[in-house]
Amino acid sequence: MSPSRKRLHLCLLPALLGLLACGTRAAPEVHLIPQGYRGPVVIFFNVPGARSALQEDGREYRIGEDGTLAVSSPPNYGGGRLDNFRFFYEGPGGTRERLAYAASTPHNQLQVFAVHQGEMPLRPGSREEVRFEMYVVGVPDEMPDWSDRLHALVERKVAAMPLPR
């Protein structure tokens, strides 16, 4: 194969892989948040020894009282991700109350907002990275410090994670 043809293949391969990833639809997700919880929520992925989030018909994330959850599953990549998300307060006996999530929800109403994924080194200078998804439950107009609270929670939890062997 000629050098120019080899370069073309090396350029096309990442583009094709990207197109394939975009064509895959993310699995449906149900997020169960403790009744009345308001604040940042962080889900850590690929955590050894944690339970799997995978279910027969998608994924289920049962968030802890502190707003965090560690799962052994990888992140749920794919197209249409936010269309497949459902957020609920979960009360006693498993009762559920759906939480609003939409860009059109007024900022003076209770909702889930600022959903995004991230990654950071497990320790400064480490090659090991922690992948996570984070969002906030609350009334945006009443939480001007939501970004600081979210990042502080991520940093505190990552610092407490054990190093891989």
Image: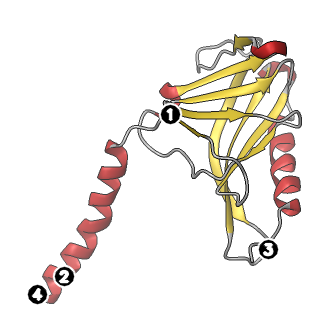
Q: Which residue is mark 2?
A: 6
Give the residue drawn at x 49%, y 30%: 57
Q: Which residue is mark 1?
A: 56
- Find out whether the residues at labels 3 and 4 contact each other: C-beta distance under 8 Å: no
The nearer-to-camera label among 3 and 1 is: 1
Q: Give the residue type at disc 1.
A: Glu
Secondary structure, mark 3, is: loop
Q: Which residue is mark 4?
A: 1
Q: Give the residue type at disc 3.
A: Pro
Give the residue drawn at x 30%, y 51%: 19
Closer to the camera in the image, 152 or 72: 72
115 left or right of 165 in image: left
Distance from the alpha carbon under mark 2 to that under mark 1 = 42 Å
Q: Give the residue type at disc 2.
A: Lys
Q: Which residue is mark 3?
A: 124
Secondary structure, mark 4, is: loop
Q: Position of residue 22 (x, y in %)?
A: 36, 45
Residue 31 position by quadrant: top right
Looking at the image, tell me whether mark 2 or mark 1 is earlier in sequence order. 2
Q: Position of residue 111 (x, y in %)?
A: 72, 18
8 left or right of 25 in image: left
